[in-house]
Amino acid sequence: MKTQKNTSRSRKKAIPQPRLLVLHGPNLNLLGGREPQHYGEVTLADINLALARRAEIAGVDLESFQSNHEGALIERIHAARAQEVRYIIINPAAWTHTSVAVRDALAATGIPFIEVHLSNVHARETFRQHSFFSDIAIGVISGLGHQGYLLALEYLLNKLNTD
Ligand code: DQA
């Protein structure tokens, strides 16, 4: 006869880990070799790995997604709502300065987000000095290189603890 163990351990429900999503816009897949004077020499894979390691230590579920296709990024933002993503870290890259559609996707989901740029966009060409995201972001980190992503994550980890 089959017996079923019913220990207090097996009855405990696993508490779902809070979810965070990191989004990278166009051309950021080329990081490491792309205009290193602006974007540094760290690859996107290394940035994502550092974020994943930090999130794992904190017990947070973090996923990173990069696309060169605006529609794909928008679909990913829509999916984030169903997945109950708590916060987003986004470097919209060139779409920062052009995309009402990506802005609207973030606004539609209502998921709070931090805008990150590797370079200091305010110290560059005039067309980079306008962002379609900054006024609806929790905050903006610009010019701190790859560390900007980790600083954004650190802020959100702290926020998750106090939410
Ligand atoms: C960027 C700045 C944008 O102006 C540019 O188009 C990028 C990267 C940054 O991280 O500094 O692709 O978002």
Image (tube, rainbow, N blue to C red):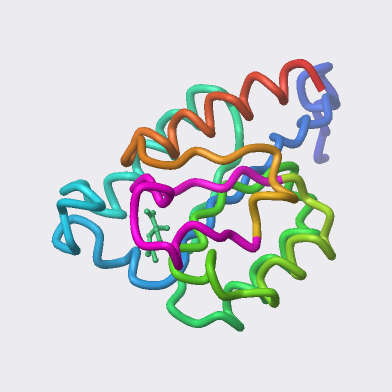
Q: In this view, does 160 lie above or below 66?
A: above
Residue beneath the point at 53% across and 32% down: 153
Q: Where is residue 59 in the image (x, y as percent from the top left)?
A: 59, 27
Q: Where is residue 5 in the image (x, y as percent from the top left)?
A: 80, 27
Q: Position of residue 8 (x, y in %)?
A: 83, 16
Q: Give whichever of 130, 140 is nearer the camera.
A: 130
Q: Give whichever of 3, 62 is nearer the camera.
A: 62
Task: Answer with the quadrant where ligand 1 appears in the image.
Answer: bottom left
Q: Is residue 37 above or below residue 1?
A: below
Image quarter (top left, top right, bottom left or bottom right) of the N terminus? top right
Q: How many marks?
A: 0
Q: Quadrant of residue 144?
A: top left
Image quarter (top left, top right, bottom left or bottom right) of the C terminus? top right
Magenta stretch encompasses residue 148: no
Residue 82 at least partly seen: no
Q: Where is residue 86 in the image (x, y as percent from the top left)?
A: 75, 42
Q: Give whichever of 72, 140 is nearer the camera.
A: 140
154 horizontally vs 48: left or right? right
Q: In which quarter of the image is residue 155?
A: top right
Residue beneath the point at 71% across and 23% down: 159
Q: Quadrant of residue 60?
A: top right
83 horizontally vs 41: left or right? right
Residue 129 at least partly seen: yes
Residue beneath the point at 53% across and 68% down: 97
Q: Give whichever of 131, 149 is nearer the camera.
A: 131
Magenta stretch encompasses residue 123: yes
Residue beneath the point at 58% across and 72% down: 73
First to last magenta residue range: 113-132
